[in-house]
């Protein structure tokens, strides 16, 4: 059984993330999606518990996916969940530079390899940071995020999430 770990902030999870998880779930036996608190990304919109709930509801259609939270090194979590690989999504060439450096560091300290899955062009512009910004200013992001996220954004930011 091949297990992969897909770590990220997921604040919030968006359709690009869902696409990567769906692809990984077709390729591997088990996918562990791990939401983390990334101090480099500043203040979050959703708490870890809220993110876990949103991720679980957004990925409920996938039987071989589980969701967890962590605040340690990704490679430590990979070891803990028995992951054979770390999976990362790539939107553009600019993502590759930072993700490659992180993958090489993770391989160096743990021996765990990282696999890159490119996103479809329809999702290549999506970034949680941009979705948060557009939603905070009242823009409709409902076609960029799963329904549970659109509803939560609308509830938390007024009608900013583009409630449906």
Image: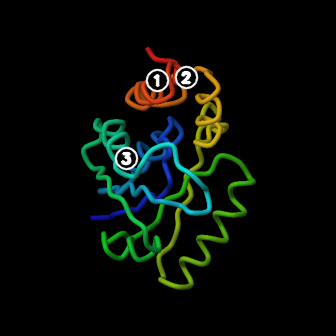
Horizontal relation, residue 103 to residue 27: left or right:
right
Residue 68 percent coordinates (x, y): 32, 57
Foreground mark, 1 or 3, reads 1
- Which residue position is annotated with label 1? 154
Q: The N terminus is located in which quarter?
A: bottom left
Q: Residue farthest to the top? A: 164
Q: Residues within 10 Å of mark 2 (few under 14, many from 20)?
A: many
Q: Which mark sits nearer the N-terminus, 1 or 3? A: 3
Residue in the image at 65% along x and 26% along y: 137
Q: Disc 3 on helix, strand or loop?
A: helix
**Residue at 24% from the left image edge and 44% from the top image edge:** 63
Between the residue at mark 1 and the residue at mark 3, the CA separation in whole angstroms equals 32 Å
Q: Is residue 126 above or below residue 116?
A: above
- Tags 1 and 3 touching, CB below 8 Å: no
Which callout, 3 or 2, points to the residue nearer the camera?
A: 2
Identify the mark at residue 26; answer none if there is no mark.
Answer: 3
Q: Within 10 angstroms of label 3, few (less than 14), some, or many (20 or more) residues? A: few
What residue is shown at x 50% (from left), y 53% (from top)? 9
Q: Characterize the local packing of mark 1: few (<14), some (14-19) or many (20 or more) Cα atoms within 10 angstroms.
A: many
**Distance (Cα) linking label 2 and label 1:** 5 Å
Q: Which residue is mark 2?
A: 160
State whether residue 118 is above or below residue 143: below
Secondary element type, mark 2: loop
Residue 22 image offset from top left, x and y in percent: 41, 42
């Amino acid at each position: 059984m091949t297990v992969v770990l897909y770590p990220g902030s997921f604040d919030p999870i968006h359709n690009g993330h869902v696409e990567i998880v769906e692809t990984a779930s077709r390729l591997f036996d088990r996918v562990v999606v791990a939401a983390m608190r990334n101090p480099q990304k500043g203040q979050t919109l959703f708490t870890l518990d809220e993110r876990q709930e949103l991720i679980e509801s957004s990925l409920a259609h996938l039987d071989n996916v589980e969701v967890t939270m962590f605040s340690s090194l990704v490679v430590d979590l990979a070891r803990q969940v028995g992951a054979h690989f770390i999976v990362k999504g790539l939107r553009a060439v600019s993502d590759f530079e930072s993700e490659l450096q992180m993958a090489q560091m993770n391989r160096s300290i743990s021996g765990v390899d990282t696999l890159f899955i490119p996103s479809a062009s329809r999702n290549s512009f999506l970034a949680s940071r941009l979705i948060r910004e557009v939603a905070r200013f009242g823009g409709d992001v409902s076609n960029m995020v799963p329904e549970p996220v659109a509803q939560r954004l609308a509830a938390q930011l007024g009608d900013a999430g583009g409630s449906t």
